[in-house]
Image (cartoon, rainbow, N blue to C red):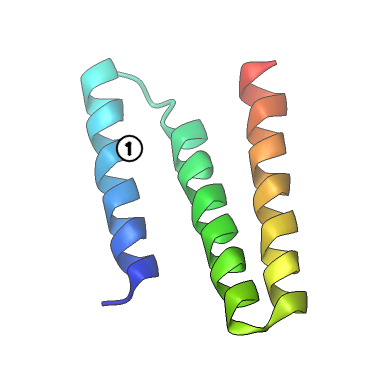
């Protein structure tokens, strides 16, 4: 398994534990935060590989996901 699928599996496990412990269905912001982080780290890895356009696109999309989570759930 690649790094991305391992990270995604860990994110799903953590969010399911969180939603079970808090007895709520509000694990969506946590899932989106993990997804934004995965997209950001993928963008950084692609920039290191020399694929700058794709990497910057991933970084911008990750920031977009995080800003939506902040706007909807925390403001």
Residue 17 % position (x, y): 22, 33
Q: Residues within 10 Å of mark 1 (few under 14, many from 20)?
A: some
Q: Which of 52/14 is in front?
A: 52
Quick one: SS at disc 1? helix
Q: Say whether residue 1 is left or right of residue 61.
A: left
Q: Which of the 4 image quadrants contains residue 31?
A: top left
Q: Which of 48/59 is in front?
A: 48
Q: Residue at coordinates 75% horizontally, 56% vertically from top-left?
A: 60
Q: Residue at coordinates 61% horizontally, 22% vertically from top-left?
A: 73
Q: Which of 54/30 is in front?
A: 54
Count the labels in the image.
1
Q: Is residue 17 above or below residue 38?
A: above
Q: Say whether residue 40 is left or right of residue 30.
A: right
Q: Is residue 23 above or below residue 20?
A: above
Residue 12 % position (x, y): 31, 48
Q: Quadrant of the N terminus?
A: bottom left
Q: Which of the 4 image quadrants contains residue 46?
A: bottom right
Residue 55 % position (x, y): 68, 71
Q: Quadrant of the C terminus?
A: top right
Q: Is residue 14 above or below residue 56?
A: above
Look at mark 1 in the image and give the residue it sits on.
15
Q: Which of the 4 image quadrants contains residue 19?
A: top left
Residue 67 % position (x, y): 71, 36
Q: Residue at coordinates 68% horizontally, 83% vertically from top-left?
A: 51
């Amino acid at each position: 398994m690649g790094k991305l699928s391992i990270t995604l599996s860990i994110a799903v496990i953590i969010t399911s534990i969180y939603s079970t412990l808090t007895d709520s269905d509000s694990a969506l912001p946590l899932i989106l935060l993990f997804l934004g982080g995965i997209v950001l780290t993928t963008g950084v890895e692609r920039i290191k590989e020399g694929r700058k356009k794709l990497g910057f696109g991933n970084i911008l999309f990750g920031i977009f996901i995080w800003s939506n989570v902040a706007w909807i759930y925390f403001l």
